[in-house]
Image (cartoon, rainbow, N blue to C red):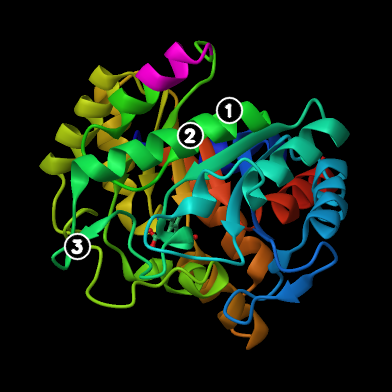
């Protein structure tokens, strides 16, 4: 009677724990925040993302204090400016909302890793991630503005910049500019593989960044493609990226695995707004166990190969992990 008895190693909680291959830890998680210029005391719930807010700088500090207490060591910031134009001037303004938030955060939480999303869609009146000419997003003219934005974040004190625009050549240009300005030690986390995904819908409400015409398919990737993901990642590695990201996460576990196997840089995955909203809605309707669904999802994203996960559930997960230990 000899056959494989996998159940031997599933017999007790202690044995299951001993042979577990994947563990999620608070330091793997990055908590996103939306910081608004409207009013320092603003705390406006985002309807499409229950539990998330547009926050003024003062409120942001309170919310960050709370997530830090729960064990989170890293945040990523998205700006919601008062003024948008066709040159994204508020994206790189010295007193722009993200620049202000970064310096306030670093003063209050010197140990916190403050990451900035480098993109223009939140600052453009038309909501696209680059300069528009003849109805088309032009690549190379956009690079200049992205570079200025990244450098302005560095000057404000950002610990990591994360370009999410998907223009070609942006990692190279941003790296060169950071080096020239003396920020040779500032890492770039590249949204290397970012798909043109319907899962960003709730984020665009939150950041008021939906494109006013057309879509993002001429710069973000086709969900049908995986070989292209390797080309995008290889280009960003060659241009000087320090970390790579795949986005969204759950529907793209194969891409996460491919990147992990082909590149040895730290790999992040973004569990995006739509993934969050799906779980929240089902939980609020009483159809699923929110905590179990989230823990399983995040564990599976790690198992696929992500070292780091950006998720709106970061602080909740840290709290749940603490309760388990
Ligand atoms: C900016 C940006 C987006 C997200 C992160 N950075 C929106 C987009 O590309 O439309 C999406 C994050 C999320 O859905 O949680 N370009």
The percent coordinates of residue 79 (x first, y second) are: 59, 56
State whether label 2 is within 8 Å of ligand 1: no
- In magenta stretch: residue 179: yes
Location of residue 279 with respect to 117 vertically, above or below: below
| Residue at the spot of label 2 | 150
Query: Which secondary structure class fits the magenta region best?
Result: helix
Mark 3 closeness class: few <14, some 14–19, many ≥20 residues within 10 Å: few
The part of the chain drawn in magenta is 176-182
Closest to the camera, between mark 3 and mark 2, is: 2
Disc number placed over residue 170 in the picture, else none: none
Instruction: Please tell me in which quadrant of the rendered image residue 38 appears.
Output: bottom right
Q: CA distance from mark 3 to mark 1?
A: 29 Å
Horizontal and vertical percent position of residue 235: 20, 27
Give me the C-alpha separation between circle 2 and circle 1.
6 Å
What residue is pinned by disc 1?
A: 154
Q: Earlier in the sequence, mark 3 or mark 2?
A: 2
In the image, is 246 to the left or to the right of 225? right
Q: Marks 1 and 2: in contact by CB < 8 Å? A: yes
Q: Residue at x 35, y 18 (%)?
A: 264
The numbered mark at residue 217 is: 3
Visible residue check, residue 90: yes
Q: Position of residue 78 (x, y in %)?
A: 57, 53
Is residue 250 located in the magenta-colored stretch of the structure? no
């Amino acid at each position: 009677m000899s056959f494989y008895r996998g159940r031997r190693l599933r017999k007790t909680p202690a044995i299951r724990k001993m042979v577990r291959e994947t563990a999620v830890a608070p330091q793997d998680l990055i908590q996103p925040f939306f910081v608004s210029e409207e009013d320092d005391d603003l705390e406006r719930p985002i309807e499409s993302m229950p539990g998330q807010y547009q926050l003024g700088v003062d409120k942001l500090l309170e919310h960050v204090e709370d997530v830090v207490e729960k064990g989170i060591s890293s945040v990523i910031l998205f700006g919601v400016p008062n003024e948008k134009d066709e040159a994204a001037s508020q994206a790189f303004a010295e007193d722009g909302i993200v620049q202000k938030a970064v310096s306030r955060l670093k003063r209050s939480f010197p140990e916190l890793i403050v990451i900035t999303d480098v993109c223009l869609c939140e600052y453009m009146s038309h909501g696209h991630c680059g300069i528009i000419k003849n109805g088309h997003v032009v690549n190379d003219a956009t690079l200049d503005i992205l570079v200025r934005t990244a450098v302005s974040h560095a000057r404000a004190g950002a610990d990591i910049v994360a370009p999410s625009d998907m223009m070609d050549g942006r990692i190279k240009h941003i790296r060169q500019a950071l080096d020239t300005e003396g920020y040779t030690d500032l890492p770039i986390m590249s949204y290397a593989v970012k798909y043109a995904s319907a899962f960003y819908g709730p984020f665009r409400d939150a950041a008021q960044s939906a494109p006013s015409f057309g879509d993002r398919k001429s710069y973000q990737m086709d969900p049908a493609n995986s070989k292209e993901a390797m080309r995008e990642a290889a280009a960003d590695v060659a241009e000087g990226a320090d970390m790579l990201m795949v986005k969204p996460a759950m529907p793209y576990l194969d891409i996460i695995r491919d990147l992990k196997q082909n590149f040895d840089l730290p790999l992040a995955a973004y569990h995006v707004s739509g993934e969050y909203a799906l779980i929240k809605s089902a939980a609020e309707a009483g159809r699923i166990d929110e905590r179990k669904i989230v823990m399983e999802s995040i564990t599976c994203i790690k198992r696929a190969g992500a070292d780091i996960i950006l998720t709106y559930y970061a602080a909740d997960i840290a709290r749940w992990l603490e309760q388990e230990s």
